[in-house]
Amino acid sequence: MIALDAKTGKELWNVDVADYKQQYAMTVAPLVVKDKVISGVAGGEHGVRGFLAAFDVNTGKEVWRFYTVPGPGSRIRNLARQGRQTQRLLPAWRSPHLGTGSYDPATNLTMWGTGNAGPDYNGDNRVGDNLYSSSVIAVDADTGKLKWHYQFSPHDEFDWDATQVPVLADVEFNGSPRKVMMLANRNGVFYVLDRTNGQFLSGTSFVKTNWLAGFDEKGRPARAPESCPQCKGPWCTPATKVERIGTTLVQSGYGLVLYPSWENSSSVYRKGEDPPEFHDGQSFTGQGPGRGGATDDVFSSIIAMDPKTRQRKWTFRMSLRPPKAACSPPLRMCCSPAAGDGQFIAIDARDGKLLWETNLGPSVSAAP
């Protein structure tokens, strides 16, 4: 991580956050909170141990570090339906950060999504829920202490990392004002949580989903039995990320929560009976999933969700290629490129109506 003088470009400090030789990477924009710079690491496909860290903005000295998974050989209580049973964690079980977090000054909490567990598509050697993978974590910005978490996809075997930017808002929920955190996850569900304590408020599918059988009273999702990956597996919606299709990348909003979506399905079967072995610095994904084509209508779109009703307000359907870039609406307009055909559009963020469009020729891979 490098700090530059904004006026002169002079380097002020330069610190190593993680060892790139172990396949660590940094792909997120850091978040500056008071006198700290907070950032996470990437590299989960190589089995790195994910963490979130804060650095002194003046010196670059690390102030605190929160590991999103325990270290090699450590033990943790499984917090979901495992009672007092503990579990030994594999050194390669990881959940790095691929997207920037959010900060709530009222609670002094910073909230970050985490990556999926590894190996991605075969969970036989990582029993249990695999906390804190495919989750959102809320930590104290001053100390790095975990205050609450919510896991979107327990024991994720679909590569549904939860690395979207948490959207914070004060909204009316069931007739009462609530401080909420909203996130449209890669698993196809739009979530609303109480951002002060992590309480699950609602989960609504915004694309076709066949993996979800419902939620219990605490908001824990139940997976449909037929959606579990096997050596000859089922079709799953939304599709796995290996086919460059996920559900959402980044959200933003103007009275509504806006985000890109890619609606598709893919076959999720394993390519081997045995769980993969971890080797330092090598790819660690679980040998899958099997490649397959879509079984139904395939399209990308911009979706607007109403945070008050948790229902879809409007959908603007785009090309057949997934939109790489995020929907980033200034004021009343949402400008978004499509990935494959060069289409560039502006739509009214209030009702989803097309304002203008042009074609840039090549594909566009950056958020406006």
Image (cartoon, helix red, strand yellow):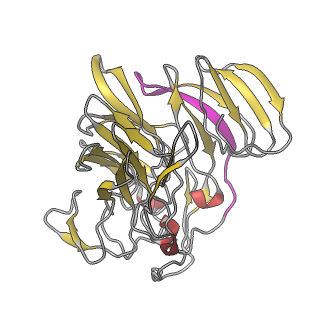
Residue 57's x, y, as percent?
38, 45
Q: Is residue 297 visible?
A: no
Above or below, comparing residue 366 to residue 104 in the picture: below
Which residue occupies the foreground of this view, 218 or 45?
Answer: 45
Residue 15's x, y, as percent?
44, 59
Above or below, comparing residue 292 to residue 249 in the picture: below
Determine whether, in the image, residue 299 is placed left or right of residue 103: right
Q: Is residue 168 visible?
A: yes
**Magenta-span inclusion, residue 23:** no
Determine whether, in the image, residue 138 is placed left or right of residue 38: left
Residue 175's x, y, as percent?
29, 16
Which residue occupies the foreground of this view, 43 or 123?
Answer: 43
Above or below, comparing residue 190 to residue 174 in the picture: below
Which residue occupies the foreground of this view, 3 or 41?
Answer: 3
Residue 96's x, y, as percent?
43, 59
Which residue occupies the foreground of this view, 209 or 197?
Answer: 197
**Magenta-span inclusion, residue 305:** yes
Count of residue discs: 0
Determine whether, in the image, residue 177 is placed left or right of residue 185: left
Where is residue 334, by image quadrant?
top right
Q: Residue furthest right?
A: 361
Looking at the rendering, the stretch of residues picked out in magenta corresponds to 292-312
Q: Please state, as top left, top right, bottom left or bottom right, where the C terminus lies in the image.
A: top right
The residue at the point 21 percent across, 57 percent down is 79
The residue at the point 60 percent across, 17 percent down is 332
